[in-house]
Image (cartoon, helix red, strand yellow):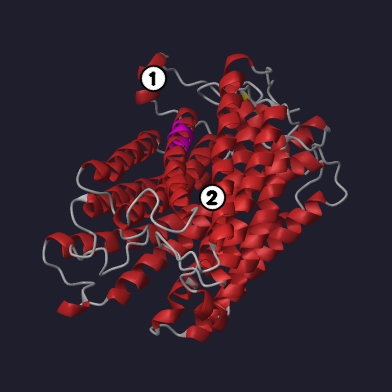
Amino acid sequence: MATTALTPAASAYRSGLYEWLTTTDHKKIGILYVVNSFIFFMLGGLLALGIRTELALPGVQFVDGEVYNQLFTMHGTTMIFLFIIPVLVGFGNYVVPLQIGAPDMAFPRINALSFWMLPLAGILLFLGFATGGAASAGWTSYAPLSEDRTLGSTGPGQDLWIMALVLIGTSSILGGINFLVTIFKMRAPGMTMFRMPILVWTVLVTSVLVVMATPVLASALIMLFIDRNYGGHFFDPSTGGTAILWQNVFWFYSHPAVYIMVLPAMGMISEILPVFSRKPLFGYKAFVFATAGIGALGFSVWAHHMFTTGQVFLPFFSLMTFLIAVPTGVKMFNWIFTLWRGKLTFSTPLLFALGFLSMFLIGGINGAFSAAVPVDFALQDTYWVVAHLHYVLFGGSVFGVFAGVYYWFPKMTGRMLNETIGKIQFVMVFIGFNLTFFPMHQLGLAGMPRRIADYASTAGWNDLNLAATVGGFLIGASMIPFLWNVFISLRNGKIAGDDPWQANTLEWATSSPPPPYNFDHLPEIRSERPLFDLRHGRTGH
């Protein structure tokens, strides 16, 4: 069997904390991304429990309206900008160079810089609590609420929010450019574009979205900062500005950002399902084109967040919103046909992948309801929207992340996570998630507005809110077995070996964990499943 020999780069091996703080190894940086993201996931989860505790019963229980506004603003901001996006970047950092047979990312020092901007941004964001109050205008920070210091945006908290997001956006842009150059220029011999794993394709399309959309958000943030601090009038209607400008610019980034947050998770699921069904991914090229289609259409639907403003052309954005469901539907059928008549192994990664499929399907369907303009008018700014958002981003992205953790943990550490504890965690997350967010559909239909700290005891929302709070605490409790699993597995978990799953892609062709230079040699790449070819002696073109 012919192989491609790789020469290890000469390097001075450092150890301990100093090595982690100064590393430019994409694998260590990927792990830093994941660990940092989970720290903020825990913080964001605590904020969510504060929200649900207040809403468990009618009446003001624990926090007043202003503190409540800070809680939901910081919860949404933390989960989106400091957990979901960075944790997926972390998996991309670790896995993508390995999957394409590259020794590292194209720009290792810029890669390190991209990461270290994130902890700094998180510190800036949470400093608001210590400086008179955190940002409280919602994670969307709609103007003029976010710039009017008499409406709850007093103090430096909102300015710290702006600067933190500028840092996060800069990190994303640098990371996106790095991924694009790495994927286009550093693939191993034989790794043509249509032999790349689906995860690499989803990271590629995501990086294009990041590079094209994030500068638009940066411009909005800078305009908002000027309005707040230097007498600008971009968004203030009383001085000739327009608040709708903020919505247009913000959502022109933030709707593609939905796909930035879910496409890599789709790629992770697309790596896991074939391995645990012992079948190739059904419709590889259709999946690639569907991914590209989602990326392209993602820029044409931003104004469906603005149906009720009266400032957008409703038929066009309604049509495009329905249309973007088509490539997503293609993917859903591809995943189902991949599983169909496969030899399924119900390990923890597959359970979380199946959780992704079922929960993301619900999120997509309830989103399609909102694409109908009359329905959207009725459901706008109700808890239906909260349910939709969480079924897409928690039911989709977070289930995908946990599937990825259980799948790639052996490669990252050389140890297997405990399967029994993993399955207990899955059951807790699955039940807790549905108990939390499914009742919010009914709350939305019953007219409960989102972003309220209190509600009347006669509104008929009491039982559903209490159920949602119980579910939220069950999700929180599910993190205990997860953290315990990681702890005991790192100490004395089962030794994984190089390829414990009998997988298909190149990262499993090297040791667990891989050496600093990634590969001693590479198998010939003649399809999108080079390790399957190697195991079964398939060497023909």
Pointer 2 residue: 469
Q: Dot 1 lies on which element?
A: helix
Q: CA distance from mark 1 to mark 2?
A: 42 Å
Decide whether residue 35 is among the magenta residues.
yes
Give the crowd class for mark 2: few <14, some 14-19, many >=20 residues within 10 Å.
Answer: many
| Residue 178, x across and y down, in percent | 42, 44
The earlier-in-sequence mark between 1 and 2 is: 1
Pointer 1 residue: 19
Three-letter code for the amino acid on which mark 1 is drawn = Glu
Furthest-right residue in this view: 341
Q: Residue at x 61, y 49 (%)?
A: 433
Nearer to me, 149 or 54: 54
- Magenta segment's dominant SS is helix
Q: Is residue 82 left or right of residue 27?
A: left
Q: Residue at x 52, y 45 (%)?
A: 183
Q: Which residues are magenta?
A: 32-38
| Residue 104, x across and y down, in percent | 48, 33
Q: Quarter of the image containing the C terminus?
A: top right
